[in-house]
Image (cartoon, rainbow, N blue to C red):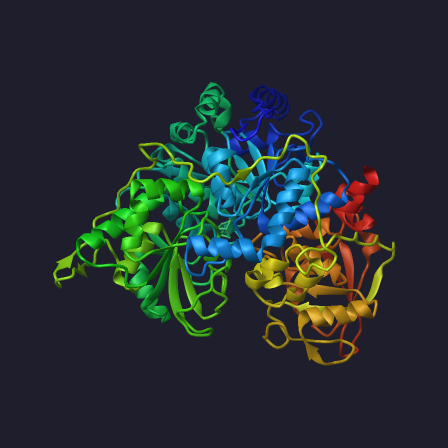
Amino acid sequence: MTNQETGHYINYKKMSENLDIVRSRLQRPLTYSEKVLYSHLDDPHGQDIQRGVSYLKLRPDRVACQDATAQMAILQFMSAGMDRVQTPTTVHCDHLIEAQVGGEKDLARANDINKEVYDFLASATAKYNIGFWKPGSGIIHQIVLENYAFPGGLIIGTDSHTPNAGGLATAAIGVGGADAVDVMAGLPWELKAPNVIGVRLTGKMSGWTTPKDIILKVAGLLTVKGGTGAIIEYHGPGVDSLSCTGMGTICNMGAEIGATTSIFPFNDRMYDYLKATKRQHIGDFSRDYAAQLREDEGAQYDQLVEINLDELEPHINGPFTPDLATPLSQFKQAVKDNKWPEELKVGLIGSCTNSSYEDMSRSASIARDALDHGIKSKSLFTITPGSEQIRATIERDGQLQTLEEYGGVILANACGPCIGQWDRKDIKKGEANSIISSYNRNFTGRNDANPATHAFVASPDLVVAMTVAGTLNFNPITDTLKDKDGKEFKLKPPSGDGLPTRGYDAGRDTYQAPPADRSTVNVAVSPTSDRLQILAGFSKWDGKDATDLPILIKCQGKTTTDHISMAGPWLKYRGHLDNISNNMLIGATNEENGEANKVKNYFTKEYDAVPATARDYKARGVKWVVIGDWNYGEGSSREHAALEPRHLGGLAIITRSFARIHETNLKKQGMLPLTFSEPADYDRIHPEDKVDLLCTELEVGKPLTLRVHPKDGGAAFDISLSHTFNESQIEWFHDGSALNTMARKA
Ligand code: F3S
């Protein structure tokens, strides 16, 4: 399955047999995503299969965890009392490295600051037979693509951009730590059978258009909610013109439209990538099985989008949301109309989304063009290589030196500014300014914790071009620049190799394989640590309806997992539930006063921070609920966003709708994610009302009653709430959490 491990094999024969069973039952052509999922069914004979309806029980091939989410996943795995993981698993140290001055120094600083966490992860992975990628090795999704993804594979990862591996025909799905724990423990993993949205590509890209522009366009068409409950499956003749890593970029950013995952069918470009990454044997095996690694003739999609690559323009998306897509030709006008700050302060390339050899080569070609005209970047400019292998290869082949000469700062092979790990110095908090990145996500404050920063996302090519001009008012296709002598010139369209002609240079060895003898490995967690805390299980449901519950906060508008459990400085408490709970919902807007982190305590009538108010209710032995708006919990797989409300005494989150991963995460922690059967009922609730929740009514497919006691003493009224619980998920609620259910049944 990978060069990093022995004893794990790709089993196309078994997958084929499973598909034959499913095919004989369904009697219809299958999409490629269905083939990958159904070939991994735990029970292909008995499993109910209906897209958008059934819950599939699946057997993923692998689990991948990044360091921020791995801490809690491993702490949870430890509490289940097993001696080794049952499914191949890896941990990747990428999220905890702050960008400050540049790669080497930032990495040394991170090793120092995070020593306790890295030591915990290094020892726990060794103990439980998990592969460990040390700090400096690179970003999880890049390493998975380089080493672990394979055509037809099913991978789950504790990070929302796990779908990146779809560029290698893998169904790779972002999950919460609790799901990862299930699979690490050998239990089947449950997923609501996704719908399939087809994106048919025709034509061929050229000039300044890149694979990134395909997903920027798709995000504009489908919006942040458009992919919910669906896999985006790319197909059509246009696919063959894309590089494997380019397809990875497209799949990566499918997370921004809420898709379960995104995937491409196996093709020769993937074979070339497998060969370049020393896995030709997998490529050859995939070729033998190629008929199963694409959609069947006549496969039906729930929705079909068509994009002609001959006509596709480069796009720039943002600010503040990744689905605000503007074609390059209209961007200057949009900057003017919306009064977005014109000066470009910082351009950032790299991240898990766009740091392939191809991306770096094309970027370097633009930088070289500028340098040849005697000019350098006008804006600050940073580069985050996706992996040590990419960094070492572009250092060997010269792109890295070109980017540095152009004015770029090479950051560590890590997430850095993409996840807010950025000690930004060029601007004061609150000052309006524009930045543009080749990253994937641009919610308010995500990169630099400054809500006034207008963050745009685009291809790395456009990012570099914009830094040459130092302004958003620049279109490299139509506009000229001035060289060092004041002579006008136009940038050449970017060029670069998809794969290194001399092969990849692996760089430093940053991988720790688990030892053969694991019996002597000790995993230590200090009881006085403020970063790691051994988990205590949550208590069981008391079997009663909950009455007289205050509403902790009625959230208005966008409530992402960043709003619920903010990243940035809080990341260091990922392994300490009580400490990190002090960030619970501090970014959410209170509908009552339009402010963040300021809610009225029902008992004291005083305004206080959200976590402090929840702690007060908990100390009084009072459970509480949250009211939320549309697509509550969009953004990431962060299970802390579900653990924290549970830890601080929450019972239910009641919204107009949920993002899938967050909804599942809430269930795993024994919370009740519920939706208004009639979305307009959101408006009938005042933040100071009290509510009863008739939990005893919880049954598969049946609504639940919310009884509202208005704050003005008016007559109580009932509201119907819907849910997506199935039988086994109801057990989680009864037992107090999925982990409790697992421990009970073990
Ligand atoms: Fe890291 Fe940003 Fe990707 S946080 S995993 S580089 S989305």
Q: Is residue 620 above or below residue 643?
A: below
Left or right? Give the position of 45 relative to 427. Answer: right
The residue positioned 26% from the left and 61% from the top of the image is 469
Nearer to us in this view, 238 or 424:
424
Nearer to us in this view, 702 or 280:
280
> Toward which corner of the image does residue 175 lie, by quadrant?
top right
Q: Is residue 517 above or below residue 335?
A: above
Q: Position of residue 737 (x, y in %)?
A: 77, 49
Left or right? Give the position of 72 relative to 302. Answer: right
Nearer to us in this view, 625 or 237:
625
Left or right? Give the position of 513 relative to 279. Answer: right
User: In this rendering, does residue 157 appear at all?
Assistant: yes
Q: Position of residue 323 (x, y in %)?
A: 45, 56
Q: Quadrant of the N terminus?
A: top right
The residue positioned 52% from the left and 42% from the top of the image is 163
Q: Residue furthest right?
A: 543
Left or right? Give the position of 422 relative to 638. Answer: left
Q: Quadrant of the C terminus?
A: top right
